Image (cartoon, rainbow, N blue to C red):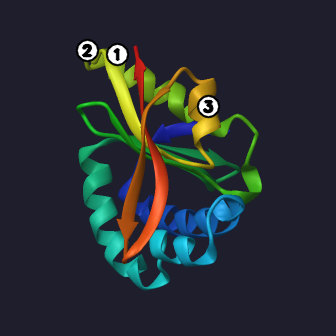
Amino acid sequence: MEIRKFRGSDIRQIVSLFYETVHSVNRVDYSQEQLDAWAPKEEMTLKLRTWQDSMNRNVTFVAETVGKLVGFSDMTPEGHLDRLYIHKDYQRQGIASSLLVHLESEARKLGLKEMDTEASITAKPFFEHHGFRVIQQQIVERRAVKLVNFKMVKEL
């Protein structure tokens, strides 16, 4: 597996991976209605454009294995870990941990003292294992559907 910087040509695989992962991995903790609100198919075209723009602005890494994109993560220059998703068929192989190590390294280079994220119910144990602590549970609304997530922070 290789961790490398994001390239614009990655965006189609990234958006596809996001939808597939949310609708399979997060099914354990969220209802179908919540998954459809979180990752609606009809927003794919919009996400291609908006995510490419934000990923170009952010510190963004992708994980590849044998030329296949199997994960991605990005963080704002202020230290907000925005997205961290691993392909549904490559879960629990250390890919998310590797991506997080790269982001933390970049955060330190930027002189940041902490990182924060908004973790799903599914991702919360992963972030706790990596030293993040819950600041508060949140109820967010997407397309008039309520979802639980957790505001988390890690001191660097």
Q: Are marks 1 and 2 in contact (CB under 8 Å)?
A: yes
CA gap, disc 1 and disc 2: 5 Å
At 37% from the left and 32% from the top, the residue drawn is 116
Secondary element under disc 1, as helix, strand or loop, is helix
Instruction: From the viewer's perspective, tell me whether residue 93 is left or right of residue 42.
Output: right
Q: Which class describes the residues within 10 Å of circle 1: few (<14), some (14-19), or many (20+)?
A: some
User: Can you tell which quarter of the image residue 5 is in?
Assistant: top left
User: Can you tell which quarter of the image residue 3 is in?
Assistant: top right
Instruction: Determine whether 90 is above or below 50 in the image.
Output: above
Secondary element under disc 3, as helix, strand or loop, is helix
Which label's residue is closer to the chain start, 1 or 3?
Answer: 3
Instruction: Determine whether 78 is above or below 53 in the image.
Output: above
Q: Nearer the viewer, residue 79 or 11?
A: 79
Percent of width and height locating residue 147? 47, 62
Residue 60 visible to an observer of this rendering: no
> What amino acid is found at the position of numbered circle 2 in the picture?
Gly
The residue at which mark 2 appears reads as 111
The residue at which mark 1 appears reads as 108
> What amino acid is found at the position of numbered circle 1 in the picture?
Arg
Residue sitting farthest toward the bottom: 42
At 28% from the left and 66% from the top, the residue drawn is 50
> What amino acid is found at the position of numbered circle 3 in the picture?
Ser
Q: Nearer the viewer, residue 143 or 47?
A: 143
The residue at which mark 3 appears reads as 97
At 32% from the left and 77% from the top, the residue drawn is 46
